[in-house]
Image: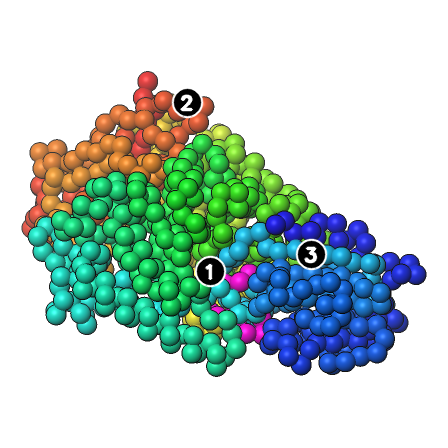
Amino acid sequence: MRLAVAALTLFAFTTSAQALTIARDGAPVAAIVVSPEATVAEQHAAAELADYFGQMAGCAFTVGDTADGPTVYVGPSAAATAAGIDADALGDEEWIVRTVGDDLIVIGGRPRGSLYAAYHLLEDVLGVHWWNPWAETVPERPTIELADLDLHGEPVLQYRDIYRIYGYDEGRFAARNRLNRMGDPPIAARYGGGMNYGPPYHVHTFYLYFRPAEYFADHPEWYSLIEGERRAEHHQLCLTNEELRQEYLRKLREFIAQTKAEAEQTGAPAPRVYSISQNDWGGQCQCENCQAIAQREGSEAGPLLDFVNYMADGIAEDHPEIYISTLAYQYTQAPPQHIKPRDNVIIRLCDTTSNFTEPITAEMNKPFHDFLLSWAQIAKNLRIWDYAVTYADPRGLPKPTVHTYAADYQFYAENNVEGVFTELEYPLKADVRDFKVWMMCKLLEDPYADQDALVTTFTDGFYGAAGPMFREYIALRDAAVKARPSHISMSASLQAVATYMTLDVITQAQAIFDRAEAAVADDAEMLQRVRHARLSLDRATVMLWRQLTKEWVARGNTPDTIPLDRDAVAARYADTWRAEIARRLPEAQHAQSAAELESEQVRYTSLPAYIAPAEKFADLPPERVHDFTADMMRNWKNIVQVVRDEEAESGIAGRLQFPTEIDTEKQPLDRYVLPMPWGLYDVRNKTGRASATIKPEDVPGPGYHWYNMGSFEIGPSYYLYFFWSWIIQLDIDAAWDDENPDQKFDIWARIKFEGPAFPHGDEADANAISVERVVLVEAE
């Protein structure tokens, strides 16, 4: 059902004779009534109306259980029944706001409907807005009069979950903006509770049920069989083991009984969903029974779903209201060919590879699009696990995605998806986070709402006079990524962002924010909001500085005349970061965040401002040469360190020295001796595209040398990886041209091998491999 709220503001206030008066000249007129039998959430809905009516009119409203004269009835009441409203027939979150004579009915289904009715009245009719957990707008209206209202709505998507809100407010912001889950922190009963998961957790529960330290010694047969050996560390369970199934079901039943008892005590809704889902890594069981199902079904989702269906059948009779949730994730993303989820099973389909700057219906996102449609055909209950941040360092860079929200949510709603879980961590440094969270809230509730109108509402309301400039900035980013497409998935790196955040785009964006700051210079709070919105741009400016300088020099200029000031930008973003720590992070994280800022600033401001092109390719036309230096690489866990190196032509290198300081046992030297593999990987299609090895005989001598992998076509989601472990990855999107997609590139890397374990190595040196830079040359 679509929400019927689009035209509310057209008749929100009136002075007609039929107006319902809530307050007049700063004094209360209408009473607020809630039944003594009302739920905690319904009582709180009445309290919220009293609070905000009072703030608007400048007077105190009270809540009672009876009244004479004009009355606002909240929750089930005799007045609602007399008006023909059957509260019991309303959905869990369905709501109604209706004037009846001199009274106003504010009612909804349980547990959250009446709260949502109150919040829609305040927001859509009276102009109250909750921008983030700390900022709100409450209009001053000494006289509050309402025209005849008959509003009725229900969220389009049943499950609306953003991980996380970080308000530490028991769910106040979530409820006011109609989220019914906010990640791990529960929503309190007075805010309607949430669509919580039962214990032990909402995801990756295999080892939470059966921790290897506790069970593996006595029951190795419960764990994955790999190459003839039962393994537990970073593996999965043997899903066809009958004894394991019975014990798993017994524990599940205990969890259900426990949480139902706890819910009766707290008054919050009991969890109705329990996760039975794979661990967050590979290692699926290769035993004969598990693989028989996997091969029959054409997917590892087969044995997983067979196991999950067993659990669902085991609780269906005693707990018909309970659902079992599992993942379609990584190796289980492809749906099975024959087996179907039971009706009390929820599939959470995880989008780990799509380009989030394009809607799901875009051609480049066809793999996930097709997975979704296939799951939608066999699953009665389907949810999406979405990613609104990137997990490759440095995180929180400009990511133009808001323009895709409405289209994606509409597509989900029209294809059997009941809800969306979105990972949006990093409350301080995530890209324009306040704007994105608010837009998600509104469009998860109603994907068919006017997105442009929502953008204007937020930007003018939250940024004040700087609102038009912020919209200009968002439009600039959207146009930039359309002009120079880049594959921004959950693992996108700095180099992927560099594809569209060019010198011209960044220069224009900084000028826009200069005007935005000037527009609110006299309002300290608004200025800080604008600066926080600018943070991702400022960080990108500093981190991409050498690439920006390279662009500038390629135009015939000198590095020192670039029309940006790196030090000033770095100082501004440091000030912004420090100012937001106390507001957005708990005290226990303050020192860590400050240290992270310091480390980031040292790394990116201490690098050379300009690095000359590689000498080997100096005679080639600059437009054919795409140069990537060590600081652009994505280094897993920073096992490979970016260091200064006098022997490196660029002055820096990614150095892997043995023994490693991190993951020492997992990165043994003997796995890195030559031959050394490297290759190309296509993220979108989840496949390797090319590979090669550097053999001992390929090393001509000590020091740095250029190594050629070959000539290959590339795509918008390709990266270059090094070593068997792939702990160095380099996004090469910037070299790809969508107008010439068949262009081949000669791929070169400048590498140094040191120490006795490598050819020509000195016995006195530590064993190490240093990757200085990568160059892609457009083949003729």
How packed is label 1: few (under 14 Cα within 10 Å), some, or many (20 or more)? Answer: some
Q: Amino acid at mark 2?
A: Asn
Which span is picked out in magenta? 177-191
Q: Is residue 718 visible?
A: yes
Residue 536 marker: none
On the image, numbered disc 1 is attached to which residue?
Answer: 163
Percent position of residue 550, x then y: 43, 36
On the image, numbered disc 3 is attached to which residue?
Answer: 152
Percent position of residue 702, x then y: 14, 40
Residue drawn at x 85%, y 75% is: 69
Does residue 356 appear left or right of residue 93 in this picture? Answer: left
On the image, numbered disc 2 is attached to which residue?
Answer: 740
Residue drawn at x 40%, y 67% is: 319
Q: Quadrant of residue 497?
A: top left
Q: Relative to 522, say whether 690 is above or below.
A: above
How packed is label 2: few (under 14 Cα within 10 Å), some, or many (20 or more)? Answer: few
Q: Nearer the viewer, mark 1 or mark 3?
A: 3
**Which residue lies most toward the front here?**
317
